[in-house]
Amino acid sequence: MKTVGEWLGSNKGDERKKPAPKGNNNQGGQKSTPHSGQKKPHQGNKPPFRNSNNAKSNNRPNTRPAHKPNNRPAQKPGGNFANGKLRVYPLGGFEQVGRNCFVVEVDQDIYIIDLGLQFPDEDMLGIDYLIPDCSSLRGKENRIKAVLFTHGHLDHIGAVQHLMPGLHFPPCFGTKLTMAFVRKRLDEEKLTSKCRLNSVEYGKKTRIGKVDVEFLKVTHSIPDSAAIALHTPYGTLVHTGDFKFDLTPINEEPADFQRLAKLGEEGVLAIIADSTNASKPGHSKSESDISETLHKLIRDAEGRVIVSTFSSLLNRIQQVTEHAKKYNRKVFVSGRSMVTNIEIAQNLGYIKAPRGMIRKVGPGMDKLPDNEVIILTTGSQGEEMAGLARIGLGTHRQIGVKKGDTIILSSNPIIGNERAVAKVINNLSTQGAIVKTNAELALHVTGHGNAEDILLMHRLVKPKHIIPEHGEPSMRSAHADLARKIGYADNQIHLLSNGEILEFDANGGARRSKSKVEVQDIIIDGKGGAAGEGQRVIRDRQIMSKGGSVVVVLKVYKDSKRLVGDPDILTRGLIYGSEQEVITKEVVERAKKAYVEALDKGNNDRKELKRSVNSALYRYFDRKLNREPMVVPIIVEV
């Protein structure tokens, strides 16, 4: 396992020497042109779709000849496959929800889509988050033409400040709001001045290296979300990002159905598509569907209203703001990420409110009548350090629960967070609050498309190959099943794991490479960066959480290595009370005996001596206490 520190070590301070070219959308030879005048990309074959009108006649013999793909000529590159190739592989996001990072190689040019983080599981004790392992790109930094961001959620941009230095700060591209959030992440580490950040418009192609990159409008739970089309010499790839088809979105236009369909007519070689809700039937609900529920709760509340949601759900925040305006309530914002995101969104026009209506939580809030106050806060997932949990515990500096407060959790608990959310709800209810959740009212909708949304995307784009992404294995398998239902063969559906490489030939065929990129867990632990060696650090913490720890200090003579007296024993979380004295004595004797026996056998190596003590104490604790503590032998020479 590698750490960010190790990954960045050899690259620290090594930046590109070429000066950044002038201009916002024309860096490094990038040329921006409208898509209408662009030469058609690869004319890939259409997939063998089944006729949906025959869905009820599955038991009847099929008298029609087997479907053959249209023989549209593919745009071939100059030369054979050996002289140029198209390869794609994920560095994250294909075995988990989060840590999204996808790499496209066009000949010698490299394009990276997203640099996201993954929030830790419950058993990843003390870990802040995980990020993609980009060590496979070391030595190839000069080949990286661009980093492309689909949208502004942390699972797609959250690792940017950790990974950009090691990538030597390639140009970054994304829509206006997305790049504002990227800039915020870079500002935190004072890296913005070293980066080349480019805001792009929907529907315009930007020439980057050998590829025309086009951002396409899609809807998600954050404005300015995009699918990305890469028009390569070998064919067009479409990366959907996170998407659903919301026909009545809040404060933005629906997805660009026309352009997606046009791409399908022109020919799409492969689609890399969101799998999160592939197992859920039907279409995802619209963000506007919950507006009426929010409206009624705010209208009928006699006291304060406290709304907890994700700080990036700007459309949800806009709905709360509009209802607050209607009922003459001021909106007070709590939580650093919530405050920052709302400020960015207001500055760019994505949240609209009268001047002075949205304020930071402060003493002025208590001067207003309760029925004129709405509080927006983070913590809808039960995070113990977030605003809502601290309000429930009574440890929030500025907000306490008042009897009769209406508290709205406008989210669904993420898998694994259910107990933490329930604990927060219980704490709030105990203090007299009226708590409303999505379990009883329509207070949250997903930002990811259900099965019918995914099928509609495939019908529009008509890719030759489908690469299910963004999800755990079961989610991506469900996506593959959907593709089979509309006629895709197994050799057109590619269930990749992180690090697996898919190669395309000049005729539009695809095969999985025999080689694989090594991908390991890179963990971020604390503000300073990485801790330990990924899984090893997590494993050590799990051992200590279950069995405690034992430190054995052995003082020895420098020359002879013989012991100077008895070892010193320090335990934490293992033994207390009456048994401590007895067990400590036994541990001293076992450790001393193991050390002396190893030394008598001629083992003078410190590692071997420590290993002997460790093994002896492991066996002792297993038999005596049925426990497996973390044993840490320390040899001190005197």
Image: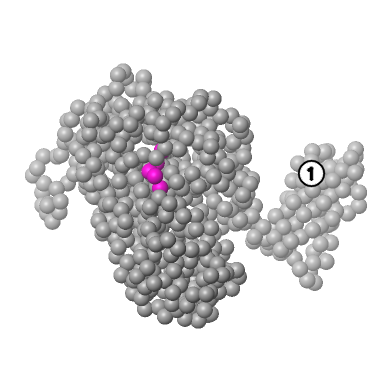
The spot of residue 39 in percent (x, y) is 24, 28
Is 550 placed left or right of 135 in the picture? right
Q: Which quadrant would the C terminus be assigned to in this image? A: top right
Q: Is residue 202 above or below residue 212?
A: below
Res 330 visible: yes
**Disc 1 marks which residue?**
609
For image coordinates 56% across by 57% down, the residue present is 123
Q: Is residue 513 above or below residue 629?
A: above
**Residue 174 is a magenta residue:** yes
Outermost top residue? 79
Image quadrant of residue 146? top left
The spot of residue 495 in percent (x, y) is 36, 43
The spot of residue 489 in percent (x, y) is 25, 41
Is 328 placed left or right of 483 in the picture? right
The spot of residue 383 in percent (x, y) is 53, 63
Q: Nearer the viewer, residue 366 or 241?
A: 366
Q: Which residues are magenta?
A: 173-177
